Image (spheres, rainbow, N blue to C red):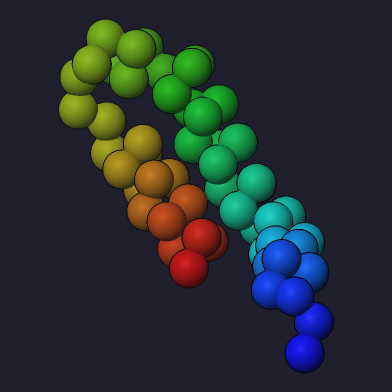
Amino acid sequence: MPPLHHLERIVTAAVRPAQDHAYRAWLGHTLACAACRAGAACTTVVRLGHAWRQARQ
């Protein structure tokens, strides 16, 4: 059986694009949204955060 770190790289490479896209969408929104920057409630950031968590699973 190959070492686990080799398998981890294979799994990570297959999943990373979806995770990366969801994270960048969330991050881009938080940087551009005036409500997020002010610390106010923002439904869009909640939705994007949920999508990012889903992509990580």
Percent across and percent down for residue 33 are: 42, 18
Q: Is 27 displayed left or right of 45 in the figure?
A: right
Nearer the observer, 26 or 16: 16
The residue positioned 71% from the left and 66% from the top of the image is: 5
The residue positioned 31% from the left and 43% from the top of the image is: 46
Percent across and percent down for residue 57 are: 48, 68
Percent across and percent down for residue 18 are: 66, 57
The residue positioned 75% from the left and 75% from the top of the image is: 3
Q: Is 20 displayed left or right of 36 in the figure?
A: right
The residue positioned 51% from the left and 29% from the top of the image is: 27
In the orientation shown, which residue stands out farthest toward the bottom?
Answer: 1
- Picture quadrant where residue 35 is located: top left
In the orientation shown, which residue stands out farthest toward the left?
Answer: 41
Nearer the observer, 17 or 48: 17
Percent across and percent down for residue 29 are: 49, 27
* Vertical relation: 23 (above or below) 12: above
Total of numbered circles in the picture?
Answer: 0
Question: Which quarter shows the N terminus?
Answer: bottom right
* Vertical relation: 55 (above or below) 43: below
Nearer the observer, 13 or 6: 6
Q: Is any atom of residue 4 visible in this view? A: yes
* Vertical relation: 52 (above or below) 31: below
* Vertical relation: 41 (above or below) 54: above
Q: Is any atom of residue 7 visible in this view? A: no
